Image (cartoon, grey):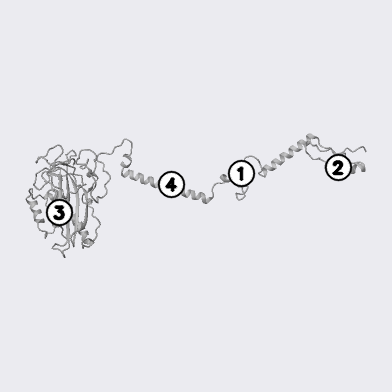
Amino acid sequence: MGTVPPPEQPDERSGEEPVISDEQWEAFLRESVEGGGAPPPKEPSARARMVARRLREEEERAAQNARGGRRGRWRRRTAAAPAHGPRPWTPAGWHTGPAWRERNGRARRNRRLWSALGLLLAVAVALVAVRPSLLTDRLPGHEAPADAAPSPLPAETALPSSAPGAAGSGTPTLAHPFRGSPALAWGDGADAIELPRAEAVGGLGTDDVALALRRTKDFLIATNLDPAVLQGAQPAAAMALLDPKQPGTLPRLRRSLSDPDRDHDPLNLVTRFDPAEVRPAGDTVKVRGHMTFAAGQPGQVRVHADYTFVYPLVRAGAGADDDAPVARTVVRRELTMNLVDPARWKATPGKLAIERYSSDTYNNECDVHDGYAHPVFPGTGPTGAPATGAAVDPYDRSRSLEGRKPDGCGVVTRT
C-alpha cells in the first residue's frame, strides 16, 4: 500500500491553517486500510494559497464597504463621543449645526436687528429729505450761509452774564432782515413772551396772579408788536388795560400821543414809526427777555417785565427789491405793573397800574421828539443832533435799565 505521506504542515511564514480538515484525513486513512479508494487529496501549492488569501481579503473588504466600515476621513465623524455627548454615529459638534430653537431664535434676532436698522435708515432719509442741510452742512469744504437760521436759544429766565457774541457777517436785506444780528436766534413776536407759572402771592390767589401776567403780556404786545401801532396808530388796546383810577397815567399818555415833546414822549411806553418815512421789513419782530412776579403790598402782585425788541425797517417808498437797504432799530423796555385787590385798594377790577418804567431806543435820531422813532439807514448819516453819549451795544442785556442815569444820546456798536 505504500507509505502514506503525512499531511503538509502549515506554512509558518504565511500564517495559514492547513487546507485539509481532520475529517477529510480520517476518511482517507480508512479507505486506504480497507483497500481501494480515492487517492489522497493534494495540498494546494504556496502560490495557490496566496491567491486564495488575496481573494478572501478582497471579499472581506467588499463586505466591510457594504457595511459602511470604510476607513479614511469618515473615521473622525464616527469617533466615539464623550459620555454625555452625541451618539457615536452622530457627527461631532461643528458638523451637526444648531438645534432648531437656537436656529429660530438667531433668525428672529437677525430679523429684529435688520428691522431696526431699516427703520433708522428710513428716519435718516426722511430727515435729510426735509432738511438737506443736516447732510450738506457736514460735507468737507461746506460753509453755512450767513443768513442760515441758528439753533433757537432757550427761554431767558434772568439777565444774562454778558452781551451775545458776534452773529456772523453780511448786510441785512428785505429777504433776510436779521442777517448779522444776534436777534436771528431770538424768538418771534408774541410767542417769545413766555409767562412764568402763576402762584398765589401777596394775599392774591393763583387766578389773580395768572391774570396779572396775561394782562402784562397783552400790554407789551399792544405797545410794541401791534402792526397798526408800529405804523403810527394809537395804542387803544394798551390804554384799555390801564386802570383809569390811577391818577396821571392815562392823561399823561394821551397828552404824549396827541402833542409830543421832550417832556411828553410816547416812545417811553409805545414803539411807533412814521409811516411816511419807513415801513416794517416783513412781519417779524425779534424778541428776547423774561417776566417775573412777586408780592407787593398786601393785596397786590407786582409783575416785572424786561424785553428787547428788534425792528427791521425799509424806507416807505421801497418796493419788493431785495437790494433795498434795511435799518434795524432796537428798543429795550423794563416796566413794573401792579394788579391790586379792589376790596382792599381803590382800583378797577382786572385793570393794571404802572408802577415804574424805563426804556432805551437804539439806532434812533437824537433830539427828535415828534412821537416817532427815526432809524438811521446804512450808508447815511444822522440828520438830527450829533450823538454825545457813550457807545453801547443794544443787544447787551446783562445790566438792568432801572437805576441807571440817562447819559444823553450815544452811538451804537451794532444793530
- Give the number of the mark in front: 3 or 1: 3
Q: Quadrant of the C terminus?
A: top left
Helix, strand or loop at disc 4?
helix
**Front position in the image: 10 or 188:** 188
- Residue 214, above or below 369: below
Which of the marked residues, 2 or 4, is nearer the chain's N terminus?
A: 2
User: Which quadrant of the view contains residue 166?
Assistant: top left
Helix, strand or loop at disc 1?
helix
Helix, strand or loop at disc 2?
helix
| Image location (x, y in percent) of residue 79 | 63, 44
Specify few, some or many for label 2: CA neighbours under 10 Å numbering under 14, 14-19, or 20 or more: some
User: Which quadrant of the view contains residue 66?
Assistant: top right
Horizontal side of residue 27 vs 316, given as left or right: right
**Front position in the image: 167 or 10:** 167
Q: Is residue 135 visible?
A: yes
Measured in 3D between alpha carbons, the distance from the residue under mark 2 to the one under mark 4, in whole angstroms, is 85 Å
| Image location (x, y in percent) of residue 411 | 15, 41
- Residue 6, above or below 212: above
Horizontal side of residue 38 vs 332, given as left or right: right
- Give the number of the mark in front: 4 or 3: 3
Q: Which residue is mark 2?
A: 25
Measured in 3D between alpha carbons, the distance from the residue under mark 3 to the one under mark 1, in whole angstroms, is 97 Å
Measured in 3D between alpha carbons, the distance from the residue under mark 2 to the one under mark 3, in whole angstroms, is 147 Å
| Image location (x, y in percent) of residue 77 | 61, 44
Please report contact status of discs 3 and 1: CB closer than 8 Å, yes or no: no
On residue 340, which mark appears? none
Please report contact status of discs 1 and 2: CB closer than 8 Å, yes or no: no
Which of the marked residues, 1 or 4, is nearer the chain's N terminus?
A: 1
Kind of residue sitting beneath label 3: Arg
Q: Which residue is mark 1?
A: 77
